[in-house]
Image: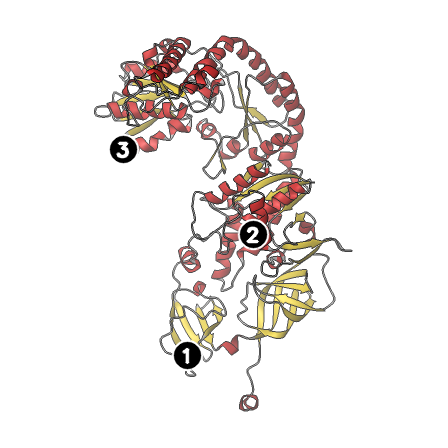
């Protein structure tokens, strides 16, 4: 096969490319330039946009003796990922830009261009498995539970997965590092990336301030009492505890959390942790890794990249996904993706549009 | 080369091995001077074309800026000349540009009396356009300015005679004539003494400090001698090959050749509408054919060629353009293979989308 290996400059994608070469594929490395200012150096944190990363990716490709190119996707990235990220926060939601990047850039713009140029598949260093199944390739969790990235791939369609390769899904991260060392890849000891790649200093609030400006509003409790002020709703996400800067403590002395964000009147509602618990959620913008599932099923859902999966009853109603959770979840924000699993298999995903709180305990219940 | 490689002395030293090294360097200097129509004293060895260009333009401006604060630079110069504009401006100088016409040939500028140096390349490295060096030199001299020409691309294919050219300063690079990487020369008249941009031991007329590598200098002279001896025949042979590329490209729809006479026989620059040059390069590379796009930033992201933009092309045109450079080792078979692969590669790259996609 002619394989396009997306090489970020990190250890995972370098080893993934190496394994594709070993498998006998005709491999071409491609580094995606996503920042409009690729000159920026980052230290301490790792990202997808720095000069250092493109140099590291090229060095790995040279070590593997494969052709290497840099594709400038900064315009697409700015529109589809960064602008979307800002707009979602402006609307009071909490987006996941990595998911968006996989959906719109790596497995869309890059894959389309690669296929048009005669490549058969795109290989990445994501930790997830693709196993053959009766209905086509099945996307499954990686065997390394600490590194499993099936969540951020949960938005991919059957058509996208049909041309995707994840050579690291059967490996543990420690083994991948050792393998990089053995192969003489100089990125073997490079730290993992965690932060949002286009926010170089890690200050998401400051980044959003620069794009959205100060939009001060009130912080209120569930009864509507004003407790303080904030510089903009984009500084908050549902479930957040830190940075509220409320002077007066709660009557019960317990810490308060963000319960709700209303960007229209710029109100942030806070309350006790118990009030964060949800028992159901509704998703929109459904995606399926194979054919759409019409019958309800008992499976698991995950709402964060590194969150624990929760058992749930999952059903499609028209354009919506309805999820009834077997156990409550806390800190679930509109805009996050809910990825649905059948055991370790990713079935599909949706964007969370609404949640239903666990009802407050009755007087009788509270007295017991 | 074996004999030279055994010499490890410092050509600036007095002892025996120093003398041996010095003899090799001076023999090479005489040889290079003879091959390009200069006197030995005028040949200043440098680390390559980039250093020669910096020494020529920045150095000449530094030497004369007290009463002549301006420099004139060709708008399609190599970055080794062009990007000195920012340096010179930051140091209080003024930069004026020698514009080009749509074919990429310099428009003879009206140079004022405050110009220290005018720099226009002999042959453009992206389009092959041969510049009106003698005319610009004359105009520069009329204004009392020095004239520099970057002849790095020219000397492999065109007769280059320093004294006949009208240039006061001329840059050369060894590896563009098949010599070693890491050596070049600035040819400078006695009167044109640029201020050193690197200070040190005062070697090379006090203009270019640093110990020379006799092996590189000798390799440069040997490669230049071979190039000059074979130049006319090689140029005729390669011109026939580029003519075939022009003809072949003409058979593909929506293409334009950006290399217009007078032009180097070794370069054909083509705009292929509706594709990304990066994609065509990838496909040709996969077929074993080397070619180049305009330029890239430090991170390797390709940029629209400043040469094509200076010629009035749009950003989209510039990003859809590819350069085919031929060398002494390019064969008729290579061209056959290129012309066999090119139409399909263009079609496929167009299917992958244009520059806006």
Give the number of the mark in front: 3 or 1.
3
Q: If the image is split into quadrants, where does the C terminus of chain B sit? A: top right
Contact (Cβ within 8 Å) of mark 3 with mark 1: no
Q: Which residue is outermost to the left?
A: B66
Residue A267 in which image quadrant: bottom left
Q: Is residue B353 left or right of residue B72?
A: right
**Is any atom of residue A139 visible in this view?**
yes
Q: Chain of mark 1?
A: A
Q: What kind of element bears circle 3?
A: loop
Q: Chain of mark 3?
A: B
Residue for badge 3 = B91
Mark number for residue B154? Answer: none
* Residue A124, placed above or below residue B342: below
* Residue B22, placed above or below residue A243: above
Which residue is nearer to you in this view: A308 or B316? A308
Residue for badge 1 = A225
The structure residue drawn at horizontal position 66% and vertical position 48%, both measured from the top left corner, is: A165
Q: Residues within 10 Å of mark 3 (few under 14, many from 20)?
A: few
Q: Chain of mark 2?
A: A
Residue B52, image x and y in percent?
37, 23
Q: Residues within 10 Å of mark 2 (few under 14, many from 20)?
A: many
Q: CA distance from mark 3 to mark 2?
A: 44 Å
**Is any atom of residue B169 visible in this view?**
no
Q: CA distance from mark 2 to mark 1?
A: 40 Å
Give the number of the mark in front: 2 or 1.
2
The structure residue drawn at horizontal position 62% and vertical position 30%, both measured from the top left corner, is: B284
Q: What kind of element bears circle 2?
A: helix
Q: CA distance from mark 3 to mark 1?
A: 62 Å
Residue for badge 2 = A101
Q: Is residue A328 left or right of residue A206?
A: right
């Amino acid at each position: 096969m002619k394989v396009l290996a997306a090489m970020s400059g990190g250890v995972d994608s370098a080893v993934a490319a190496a394994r594709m070469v070993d498998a006998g594929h005709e491999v071409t490395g491609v580094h995606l330039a996503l920042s409009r200012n690729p000159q920026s150096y980052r230290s301490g944190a790792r990202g997808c946009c720095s000069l250092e990363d493109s140099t590291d990716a090229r060095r790995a490709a040279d070590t593997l003796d494969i052709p290497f190119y840099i594709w400038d996707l900064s315009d697409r990235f700015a529109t589809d990922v960064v602008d979307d990220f800002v707009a979602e926060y402006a609307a009071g939601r909490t987006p996941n830009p990595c998911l968006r990047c996989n959906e719109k850039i790596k497995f869309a713009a890059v894959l389309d261009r690669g296929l048009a140029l005669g490549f058969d598949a795109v290989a990445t260093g994501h930790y997830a498995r693709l196993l053959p199944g009766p209905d086509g390739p099945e996307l499954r969790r990686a065997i390394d539970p600490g590194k499993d990235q099936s969540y951020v791939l949960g938005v991919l369609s059957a058509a996208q997965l049909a041309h995707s390769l994840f050579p690291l899904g059967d490996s543990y991260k420690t083994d991948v590092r050792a393998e990089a060392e053995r192969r003489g890849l100089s990125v073997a000891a490079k730290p993992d990336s965690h932060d949002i790649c286009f926010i170089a200093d890690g200050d998401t609030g400051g980044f959003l301030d620069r794009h959205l400006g100060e939009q001060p509003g009130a912080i209120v409790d569930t009864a509507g009492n004003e407790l303080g002020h904030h510089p903009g709703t984009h500084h908050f996400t549902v479930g957040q505890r830190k940075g509220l800067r409320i002077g007066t403590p709660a009557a019960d002395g317990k810490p308060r959390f963000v319960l709700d964000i209303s960007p229209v009147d710029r109100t942030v509602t806070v309350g006790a942790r118990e009030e964060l618990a949800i028992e159901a959620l509704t998703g929109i913008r459904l995606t399926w890794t194979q054919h759409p599932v019409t019958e309800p099923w008992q499976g698991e859902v995950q709402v964060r990249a590194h969150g624990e999966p929760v058992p749930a009853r999952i059903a499609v109603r028209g354009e919506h996904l309805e999820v009834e959770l077997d156990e409550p979840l806390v800190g679930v924000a509109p805009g996050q993706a809910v990825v649905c699993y059948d055991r370790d298999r990713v079935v599909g995903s949706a964007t969370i549009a609404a949640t239903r709180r666990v009802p407050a305990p009755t007087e009788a219940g509270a007295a017991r | 080369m074996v004999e030279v490689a055994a010499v490890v002395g410092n050509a600036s030293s007095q002892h025996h091995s120093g003398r041996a090294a010095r003899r090799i360097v001076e023999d090479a200097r005489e040889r290079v001077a003879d091959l390009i129509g200069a006197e030995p004293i005028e040949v200043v060895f440098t680390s390559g074309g980039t250093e020669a260009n910096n020494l020529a333009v920045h150095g000449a401006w530094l030497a004369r800026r007290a009463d002549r604060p301006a420099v004139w630079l060709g708008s399609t110069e190599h970055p080794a000349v062009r990007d000195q504009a920012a340096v010179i401006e930051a140091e209080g100088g003024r930069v004026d540009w020698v514009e080009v016409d749509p074919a990429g040939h310099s428009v003879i500028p009206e140079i004022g009396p405050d110009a220290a140096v005018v720099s226009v390349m002999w042959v453009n490295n992206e389009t092959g356009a041969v510049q009106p060096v003698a005319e610009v030199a004359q105009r520069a001299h009329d204004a009392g300015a020095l004239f520099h020409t970057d002849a790095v691309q020219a000397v492999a294919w065109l007769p280059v005679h320093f004294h006949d050219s009208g240039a006061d300063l001329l840059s050369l690079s060894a590896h563009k004539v098949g010599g070693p990487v890491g050596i070049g020369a600035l040819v400078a008249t006695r009167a044109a003494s640029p201020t050193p941009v690197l200070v040190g031991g005062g070697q090379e007329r006090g203009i270019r400090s640093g110990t020379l590598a006799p092996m590189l200098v000798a390799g440069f002279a040997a490669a230049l001698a071979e190039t000059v001896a074979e130049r006319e025949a090689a140029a005729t042979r390669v011109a026939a090959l580029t003519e075939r590329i022009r003809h072949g490209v003409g058979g593909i729809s929506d293409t334009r050749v950006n290399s217009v006479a007078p032009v180097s026989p070794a370069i054909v620059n083509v705009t292929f509408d509706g594709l990304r040059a990066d994609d065509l390069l990838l496909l040709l590379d996969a077929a074993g054919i080397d070619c180049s796009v305009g330029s890239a930033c430090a991170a390797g992201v390709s940029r629209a060629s400043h040469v094509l933009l200076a010629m009035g092309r749009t950003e989209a045109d510039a990003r859809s353009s590819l350069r085919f450079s031929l060398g002494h080792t390019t064969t008729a078979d290579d061209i056959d293979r290129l012309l066999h692969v090119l139409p399909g590669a263009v079609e496929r790259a167009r299917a992958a989308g244009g520059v806006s996609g």
